[in-house]
Image (cartoon, coloured by chain):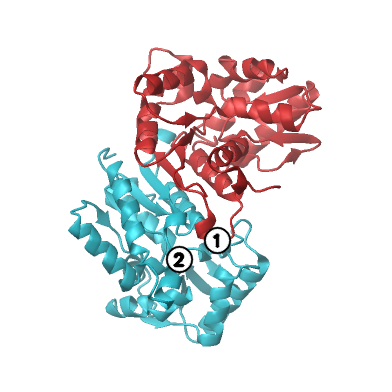
Chain colours: A red, B cyan
Amino acid sequence: MVPDKMIGIVGGVGPYAGLDLMKKIFDETAASNDQEHLPVVMISESHKIADRTSFLLDKTKTNPAFAIVEVIKKLVSVGATVVGIPCNTAHSPHIFQVIKQQLRESATKVTLLHMVEETARYLTDKVAEVKKIGVLSTTGTHKTKIYPQILQRFGLQAILPDTTLQKQVHRAIYDPEFGIKTFSNPVNEKAKEILIDAISQLEQAGADIVVLGCTELPLAITQRKIGNCPIIDPTRILAKALIRAVDPNKLFPF
Amino acid sequence: MVPDKMIGIVGGVGPYAGLDLMKKIFDETAASNDQEHLPVVMISESHKIADRTSFLLDKTKTNPAFAIVEVIKKLVSVGATVVGIPCNTAHSPHIFQVIKQQLRESATKVTLLHMVEETARYLTDKVAEVKKIGVLSTTGTHKTKIYPQILQRFGLQAILPDTTLQKQVHRAIYDPEFGIKTFSNPVNEKAKEILIDAISQLEQAGADIVVLGCTELPLAITQRKIGNCPIIDPTRILAKALIRAVDPNKLFPF
């Protein structure tokens, strides 16, 4: 235990994605009683943080980066030393670079992990045989090419849905009638069906593995494999990276 | 939305009980997108908070009240206006009264809800026909008679396990081989079996309804009924009370 270190979570992007990250931090921590768990703080101020995809698709709105920075400062004020943002879309350079710049300018002392880079690193280190990575995401993440660009830097190739399939995937997340952001618990069957079909289409398009590149998706797809296709959950990878940053000895070995 | 109000959760008592409370707050909030959710902050510093039952059974150790007060102060420093502690045992007068006194002495401006009183009020208001309330809890909660005393004030009678059964219930929570505090996700089948048997024994002893009087128990017993016996989850009642304290219009009606 390193008591002066603490994990911070920018919650609310969305609320259940924050919970899912915190749960995976506890799940991946080697602890046999309450006292052996690592310190974690989460602030979920979803009402203050504009939708990340809406911002990316229509740049005239306020950049959610500024509200995210305010949350990070609060996390740091109560002791957080390393922070994760459980929202892939927030890692678009248009948002993430502004967050980094604001933190630098305000001299906020904190390590901010990059969820998508952590995922690419994991794929390179742990599943060396795969090269073609299917990616499911919001249309915001899709259009700003976050995954293809970062995967390429790590020598990997992204396989993305075509426009028609992408619209379906986005609806599985955002549709007010059945999307995960409206029905998180339990997730609507229609959202699940769309996503399982999308995974199968990416596999047919050559993907060796599929990344759930939106933190709402692991709420719907909890399996580690769909058919023969292994599923990668960046929320779990971020959880492990946050634990490692605080105390590598606390990382559950399996 | 009342943006200057915020829910605070004393996490880490235990870590999964904190998560469960936060999840139930989101579940019980009427929201159809991220931005409609209420602001919530949780600090999980389980390594600093001594086990509540150990303190109650051996008064020579540090009162966990002091560490809990430090967490509450941090929650308030980032905006929390109403706070819940998802640990029944922490509501024993030996702990809870010290927390209240410390908050008064430090002039900390916050509304601290009392989980057990909220549960007794719910039972009186919502399920008026029941009078005999079975209570499953840790041995700390059991010995300090938190539930019987508070239920009595509300005109209700507690039905508690006898010494042999209480030992079993406590093991279902704390046993290092199968207890919920060691195996939270998934919960071990042996812990579930002990608890289902205990509910049946309380029913045979006259209980009309059974309260899961330890926040680890709803992780194992997720059903609303076991056989014919309705199950009451104080974590869900606390979640609803916290929402009501911030904005009653946000409380999901069903």
Q: Chain of mark 2?
A: B
Judging from the image, what secondary structure is the residue with disc 1 in? loop
Q: Residues within 10 Å of mark 1 (few under 14, many from 20)?
A: some
Kindly identify the residue that appears in the image at 35 percent across and 73 percent down: B128
Counting labels gives 2
Q: Is residue B76 visible?
A: yes
Instruction: Examine the image and state in which quarter residue A150 appears.
Output: top right
What residue is at 55 percent from the left and 31 percent from the top? A173
CB under 8 Å between callouts 2 and 1?
yes
Please tell me whether mark 2 sits on a helix, a strand or a loop: loop
Q: Are marks 2 and 1 on the same chain?
A: no
* Amino acid bearing label 1: Asn
- Circle 1 chain: A
Please give the label number shown on residue B51: 2
- Name the residue beneath numbered marker 1: A33
Q: Percent from the top left, x then y, of residue A196?
A: 70, 34
Indicate the position of residue A213 as horizontal and vertical percent values: 61, 28
Front one among B20 and B46: B46
